[in-house]
Amino acid sequence: MRLSCPLCGPRDRREFYYYGSDDYLNRPHSDPQADASSGGWSDAWEDYLHLRDNPAGRLRDLWYHEGGCGAWLAVTRDTSTHQVFDVALVVDLKGKAGS
Amino acid sequence: MRYSGLKVLAQGVMGNRGWRPAWRTPAPKSEYDMIIIGGGGHGLATAYYLAKNHGITNIAVLEKGYLGSGNIGRNTTIVRANYFLPGNSEFYSHSLKLWEGLESDLNYNVMHSQRGLINLFHSDGQRDAFARRGNAMINQGDDAILLDREGVRSHLPYLDFEQTRFPIYGGLLHPRGGTARHDAVAWGYARGADQRGVDLIQNCEVTGIDIQNGRVTGVQTTRGPIRAKKVGMVAAGRSGQVAAMAGMRLPVESHILQAFVTEGLKPVIDHVVSFGMGHFYISQSDKGGLVFGGDLDFYASYAARGNLPMVEHVMEAGMTLMPMIGRAKVLRSWGGIMDMTPDGSPIIDKTAIEGLYIDCGWNYGGFKAVPASGWCMAHLMATDHPHEVARRFRLNRFATGHLLDEEGTGSQHNLH
Ligand SMILES: Cc1cc2nc3c(=O)[nH]c(=O)nc-3n(C[C@H](O)[C@H](O)[C@H](O)COP(=O)(O)OP(=O)(O)OC[C@H]3O[C@@H](n4cnc5c(N)ncnc54)[C@H](O)[C@@H]3O)c2cc1C
Ligand SMILES: [Zn+2]
């Protein structure tokens, strides 16, 4: 498997660290008032940390170009065929998380 | 038909013409008391114990392919009870005891072989951790022996003891650990369930779960709708898709795990050996093939095949540990889909939907769990109460903070 890093070009899978699905882009904001009553826990944290759509098909997930430029990448690919459709820089998605 | 040595002999003399299929091939009825989705090890064992322990026999197991086409026929067959955390420890201990009586219980040869499992360690810190694990195993009532370097050498003289990257300090021997024939486990449970009246429906994919007023009423399948009062979702790597039919999102991410087997060789590896630091483990099948594997490929995947980097990594680790296997030819490699949870431990629980139950999250350790998982899932579905040894395998434990993170690697699905 190869991923085309937008900064480095096509690179071998060995250069990348895998994190997980793009749920990790939706880090919940802390809400002091709600946190005070719930002990800091909310369904948003459950969604962010644990629950996954886990599709057999198209998925966008996060990879870190550890052995290259050090960028975090959002890779859109098919989990059944390993075909890669798109690789984007996570910084470019800022503010568009979950879109 | 009851199997026995005498039967084998008599059939041998008569040209083996008297054997009959081990289970029926019934058409699905329009309604059952209970439906199990998934005819893997866990689904079949659940049906078997529902019938045997609870007398519930109006059950169908719905399998989208053929029985045993999933991970139950793809794993590397290690059976052990060397877990550390309360919650896991008693569950796997219970499972190993069931394994020890399984063949006579099922009247089926599952080739359970307690050849001993040795987990190697390579530093003082690791030795301490393994000693502690061994004590936990002994406290649980299972067996563990801490071996020093010479102790390991006496069991495994063929390891490379001169290797300096991960020098062998010793190993934790679990004498009751070992292997079993994976398909035979599926077949034995299938036969036992069938004999007690359970309908095993193959080529029957569940495509929808019917829910009315918060209560399950049945399922939609490729062979028509089937009604049931209770439905158990036991779909291992495909649990996410099945649960989605009930509108649920699970704490599960599916990953690929590869394994390898060589050509048949004369007996050379007597134990199950695991080399955790190098991400490698190995045993020798009764046919003579060296069966070995390593870690996940680490990215979410439903392809039942992996990628080259992990193949290379596993081979390198094997060569580091036991250079003698370098000339064996690898015959096949394959992959299976692992239902990975954020703490590496499984789920056997009710869902928020009345009558709908789930058994999943077996990560890459669900083969050894088959007997106890079936036992406990059957108990849950029959009585609506969790079985004592599975009481911590709750679906909501991630939200409540009661994680069972055996390896202490944190809430990332692929790190367990
Ligand atoms: C390479 C490898 C090595 C492993 N090594 C070990 C080991 O050494 N020791 C150990 O303890 N564990 C091991 N495991 C893990 C173990 O194999 C699994 O955890 C376990 O088999 C999963 O449970 P199961 O047998 O019920 O799964 P499966 O056999 O996968 O059963 C699930 C079934 O559900 C069916 N299904 C899915 N969706 C539907 C649907 N919609 N409708 C109808 N049916 C459906 C599938 O077709 C499948 O047959 C290994 C796994 C792999 C892949
Ligand atoms: Zn890069």
Image (spheres, helix red, strand yellow):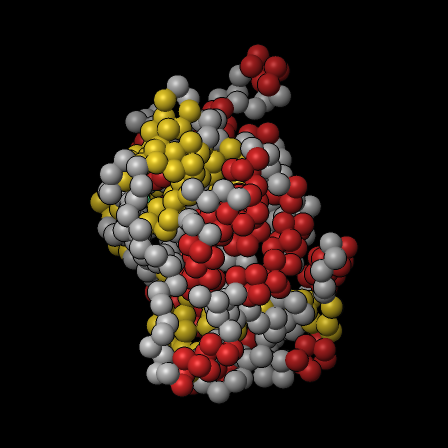
Residue B170 falls left or right of residue B240: right
Which quarter of the rendering shows the N terminus of chain B? bottom left
Residue A64 shows in the view: no
Instruction: Kindly indicate the quadrant of the structure image that contains residue B133.
Output: bottom right
Residue B298 falls left or right of residue A56: right
Instruction: Kindly indicate the quadrant of the structure image that contains residue A41.
Output: top right
Residue B161 x/y as whole percent = 63, 80
Image point 55% across, 80% down: which residue?
B269
Image point 39% across, 19% down: which residue?
B213
Residue B304 x/y as whole percent = 33, 57
Residue B397 x/y as whole percent = 57, 34
Image point 33% across, 77% down: which residue?
B17
Q: How many marks?
A: 0
Residue B233 x/y as whole percent = 42, 40
Image point 36% across, 74% down: which residue?
B18
Residue B371 falls left or right of residue B289: right
When the figure is inspected, residue A34 is found, relative to residue B313, above or below; the finding is: above
Instruction: Depth check: give the residue in front, B301 or B241.
Output: B241
Instruction: Depth check: give the residue in front, B234 or B308.
Output: B234
When the figure is inspected, residue B254 is found, relative to residue B97, above or below; the finding is: above
Residue B285 shows in the view: yes
Instruction: Depth check: give the residue in front, B405 or B114.
Output: B114
